[in-house]
Amino acid sequence: MQSYVINLIRHGAVDETLKGKYIGSTDVQLSKKGREGLVAIREGTGYPQPQKLYSSPLLRCTESCEIIYPGMDINCLGSFRECSFGEWEGKSAAELSENPLFAEWLQNSDKTPPPGGESGKDFAARISKGFERLVETMSAEGITEASLITHGGVIMTILAIYGLPQAPSYQWRMDNGYGFSVRVNPFLWMRDRVVEVFDTCPRAPKREEISENSENI
């Protein structure tokens, strides 16, 4: 039975996030450091080469696609946009610290959305629907490996819901330009709606590879 691989990769760094601001639906560009970081990874460790490339439609993700996979067609999927923080977009935790709704949101984001934004529950529902549709599309089109360039919150949500081994979302954090590769086994997917998280993305070098490289330094 044919299995499918999806490489979940977080976009490059943006200045606003590095400044501690909430940036979800705001369409910002990669920073200079973010672009340089992706080039360094691409030319160093390298990225897996998929048959098809998917992306969040936000600019920081499509720009990342162009750097990681130059010349490859980008298929944008709105389901994989970052969570919308509504009126809190572009603001930092320090700026919101006196807002009682902000404190309530920190305690229970599933039930308490930012003003004009998404609750954690609605965000997870959107991501789940999009991910299941992506798996169905790959199966129908015979795509055995795809890469999805998206946001850290999206990747953590996907893995918290579907990933094996099971772990809460905060344990799936990743740096910009990195992520995880998952394997979709059709039998396990149809029975339990789970995917195997089998490696980091880019692939982490094995111990013997590290040892061989150190001998050549």
Image (tube, rainbow, N blue to C red):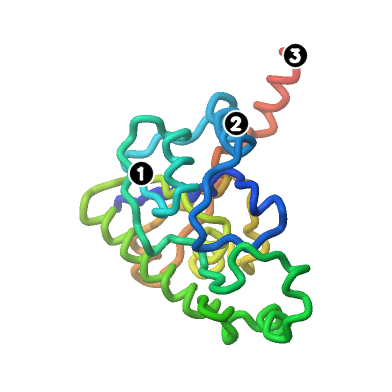
- Along the line of sight, which residue is nearer the eye, 53 or 213? 53
Front of the two marks 1 and 3: 1
Q: Residues within 10 Å of mark 1 (few under 14, many from 20)?
A: many
Q: Secondary structure at mark 2?
A: helix
Q: Amino acid at mark 2?
A: Glu
Identify the element where label 1 is drawn.
strand
Q: Is residue 56 above or below residue 131?
A: above
Label 3 element class: loop
Task: Locate residue 99: give its quadrant.
Answer: bottom right
Q: Which residue was labeled with disc 1? A: 53
Percent x, y for residue 55?
Answer: 40, 50
Disc 1 to disc 2, how far (Cα)?
Answer: 21 Å
Given residues 209 and 95, the one toward you in this image is 95
Question: Pointer 2: what residue?
Answer: 36
User: What numbered label is drawn on residue 217?
Assistant: 3
Confirm whether residue 177 shows in the render.
Answer: no
Q: Position of residue 189 (x, y in %)?
A: 38, 65
First-in-chain label (1 vs 3):
1
